[in-house]
Amino acid sequence: MAEQAIVQIKNLSKTIGKKKIIKNLSLDLHKGEITGFLGPNGAGKTTTIRMMVGLMRPTEGEVWIDGQSVQADFEGSIQKVGVIVENPEMYKYMSGYKNLLHFSRMHKGISKERIDEVVKQVGMQNRINEKVASYSLGMRQRLGLAQALLHDPKFLILDEPTNGLDPAGIREFRIYLQKIAKENGVAIFVSSHLLSEIELLCDRIAIIQNGELIDIKNVNDLQKSRYYIQAEPLELAGEVLTGIGFPAVLHDKGYLIDSGAEHIPGAINLLVGAGVRIFAVQPYRETLESQFLEMTGGGEIAQTHTK
Amino acid sequence: MTWIMAALLVVVVFAGIGITKWMNSTATENANENWRDIAQAEIANSMVMLEEPDLSEPQADYYEGRIAIAEHRLANDIPSFEYASMQQQVIDTHMMMSLVTLLAVIMAGGIVASEFSQGTIKMLLTRPVKRWKILTSKYITVLLFAVVLTVILLISTALAGLLFFGISDGTLLVWNGSEVSETSFWLEALKLAALKFSSVWMISTFAFMLSTVFRSSSLAIGLSIFLMFTGIQAVFLLQNYEIVKYYLFTHTDLTQFFTGNFMISDITIQMSIVVLAVYFLVFMAISYWTFGRRDITA
Ligand SMILES: Nc1ncnc2c1ncn2[C@@H]1O[C@H](COP(=O)(O)OP(=O)(O)O)[C@@H](O)[C@H]1O
Ligand SMILES: [Mg+2]
């Protein structure tokens, strides 16, 4: 991306005791872009986020937000950030509205109208005057999102935000985040340990394991065009496909070919002409999940982090 | 919560003064106390005290003042307030101020620790407000609460005194070191309450520090209240050692210089103020330092 990054994480490290929890992590985040932060439980997502918002002091490295260092100019940088770290914790004995009012006073110039607007955006207008103690986890997540959005931040950080939301809620949430990224140019950083939850939401995904950033992938790159053709007889089909320049890989009862959609009808014609019987032609997408597991070593992750 | 504490204070004051009234009405010898006899006794007592060999200068000044006032009363026929009068109750309000300390400690011990136990600390510290500012606003809240409680205590004592005892037609006299003059009982009550406030202030600051450092309200409140009661006792255990002069509880109650109940001899109010200031700065430094640097993992 050509544009200057709005958030720069530079060589961030955190050591607690003798344990190096975050190892030299660097990452840039851009305006209007939604970046996923994917890693198994205990990988260091929350710790990284805590350092990004000044809750923890990095052992080494710095975080820059819109040209200001979080470590050197806390107030200047953090006023551009909205964040939920783990589950949002509110004052349970107060109403949702009172909570928002309380937090809004710690920012400059948030009007009552702005609070009402945000409440409506997260769909809480019917329950906002009830005590937080009576809210479900999903409603607390919505209220958490509301407090993060109050001051119209340029940068939004959400730590495992879909926790407690039902599928309809997750979908609504995804559409809403994509809208504010696109329309308001907000940079969004969403952590998760479940790829399936953020795959549809994010533009790119940074993968963390054992405190190390191991890969950054563009979601579009991951979905390269591939087709599966089920055909008989197999050998003949293989000969035809390689004959026209497709490196065909045997898969299940047919072949996988890397090709754009425009070449598919022609290939089918040739196959049929050569006497091959076609049973199925479908776009083939290897799920990100399996790629993710491949990268992070599959089931082993869970083991190394269960105590 | 804060309203409950304030209401509790009012109830306790009314109950306390009501009980005093009831006990006075059953004990007959107190009922017809005569201000002249009291003044005579005051002179006699003070004379005896002045004979004490190791009397410090502030103590001697105090007893000389008592004698001067009592003699002035007898010579000019100026009665004092009876004990069972609204005015005397208001002047004595400072003796009830450990109640304020208790309630202020409960607030001070909870105000920071509760943010940690509720998990809301991370929501507070991700606002564009520096940590020291947040801590300062919490600390000011505690002090304001203690001031308001003190004012409530004074007002409810006056109301309860009015209800149970009524107004005395005595006059309050004070000794400034060279002459006796009249003064208003409100002024005297405010002065003593303000002096006693030093104790409220120090103990709540201590509770506030514990709350910030240990993030546990029960520990902060428990330990502070424990120290509030045992700390004074320790003064007597330490009284033969030099260290007692630097011990916090020797100095917390500044009214000692005006009521004659000295914790130890040879301390002056200036000394006490310096010692209190040093403790205060240490408590504050520890609070701000730990709160400012702590990694928030709650
Ligand atoms: N305060 C702490 N002291 C010691 N180790 C910690 C502390 N906080 C987190 N960790 C360890 O750091 C690692 C990363 O934790 P965390 O950032 O919460 O992971 P994630 O959010 O990705 O699940 C874990 O192995 C965890 O045990
Ligand atoms: Mg986490």
Image (cartoon, grey):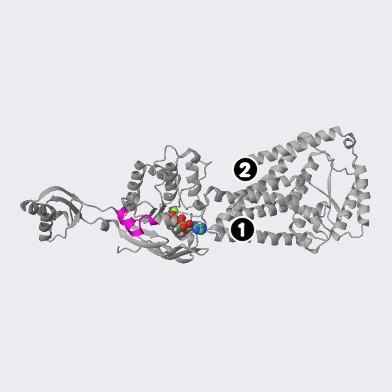
**Of helix, strand and loop, which one carries label 2?**
helix
Q: Characterize the local packing of mark 2: few (<14), some (14-19) or many (20 or more) Cα atoms within 10 angstroms.
A: few
Q: Characterize the local packing of mark 1: few (<14), some (14-19) or many (20 or more) Cα atoms within 10 angstroms.
A: many
Q: x%, y% of residue B265?
A: 84, 59
A111 over A59 or under it: above or below: above
Q: Which residue is drawn at 80% across and 60% down?
A: B268
Residue B161's image quarter?
Answer: top right
Per the image, the residue denoted by label 1 is B287
Closer to the observer: label 1 or label 2? 1
Q: Which labelled disc corresponds to residue B2?
A: 2
B196 sits left or right of A273 in the view: right
Whether ligand 1 has any atom under 8 Å from the Cβ at mark 2 is answered as no
Give the mark nearer the N terminus: 1 vs 2.
2
Q: x%, y% of residue A199?
A: 32, 52
B228 over B293 or under it: above or below: above
The span picked out in magenta is: A288-300
**Which chain is home to disc 2?**
B
Residue B23's image quarter?
Answer: top right
Q: Distance between the Cα atoms at labels 1 and 2?
A: 23 Å
Q: Residue at x 47, y 46 (%)?
A: A100
**Along the viewing direction, whichever of A299 and B291 lies nearer the viewer:** A299
Q: Residue at x 18, y 53 (%)?
A: A227
**Which chain is home to disc 1?**
B
**Along the viewing direction, whichever of B251 and A141 lies nearer the viewer:** A141
**Along the viewing direction, whichever of B54 and B162 lies nearer the viewer:** B54
Q: x%, y% of residue B267?
A: 81, 60
Q: Quadrant of the N terminus of chain A?
A: bottom left
Q: Residue at x 72, y 51 (%)?
A: B228
**Along the viewing direction, whichever of B231 and B11 lies nearer the viewer:** B231
